[in-house]
Image (cartoon, rainbow, N blue to C red):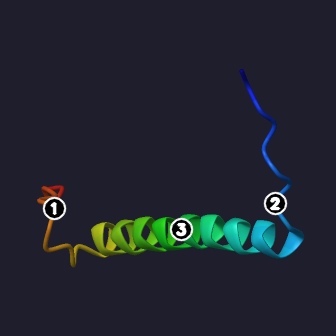
Amino acid sequence: MAVPKKRTSLAKKRIHKSLWKRKGYWAALKAFSLAKSLSTGNSKSFFVPTPK
């Protein structure tokens, strides 16, 4: 039989939310950094053919 869970306190809720947001922030930062290195041609991990 299903039993309802206890309510999470506001403090815990804020902690979980901030951790979740921080993960997204770092993912976006990495993506932006990679895009910047690709656009400038300084990328070491991707091979980008130069236009002739």
The residue lying toward the viewer, choosing from 25 and 7, is 7
Q: Is residue 35 left or right of residue 7?
A: left
Kind of residue indicated by mark 3:
Lys
Q: Is residue 36 left or right of residue 25?
A: left
The residue lying toward the viewer, choosing from 35 and 16, is 16
CA–CA distance in space, label 2 to label 1? 44 Å
Tell me where residue 16 sits by quadrant.
bottom right
The residue lying toward the viewer, choosing from 28 and 42, is 28
The reply to whether discs 2 and 1 touch (Cβ–Cβ < 8 Å) is no
The residue wearing badge 1 is: 46
Picture coordinates of residue 2, whole percent (x, y): 73, 25
Disc 3 on helix, strand or loop?
helix
Which image quarter holds the C terminus? bottom left
The residue that appears at 65% across and 67% down in the rendered structure is 21
Tell me where residue 19 sits by quadrant.
bottom right
How many other residues sit within 10 Å of disc 3, few (<14), some (14-19) or many (≥20)? few
First reached walking from the N terminus: tag 2 or tag 1: 2
The residue that appears at 41% across and 71% down in the rendered structure is 30
* In the image, residue 6 above or below residue 39: above
Q: For the residues carrying marks 3 and 2, which lies nearer the camera in this image?
A: 2
Disc 1 on helix, strand or loop?
loop
* In the image, residue 12 above or below residue 49: below
CA–CA distance in space, label 3 to label 1? 24 Å
Picture coordinates of residue 44, whole percent (x, y): 13, 74
Kind of residue indicated by mark 2:
Thr
First reached walking from the N terminus: tag 3 or tag 2: 2
Q: For the residues carrying marks 3 and 1, which lies nearer the camera in this image?
A: 3
The residue that appears at 11% across and 59% down in the rendered structure is 47
How many other residues sit within 10 Å of disc 2, few (<14), some (14-19) or many (≥20)? few
Q: Is residue 24 left or right of residue 7?
A: left
First reached walking from the N terminus: tag 3 or tag 1: 3
Picture coordinates of residue 35, whole percent (x, y): 38, 66
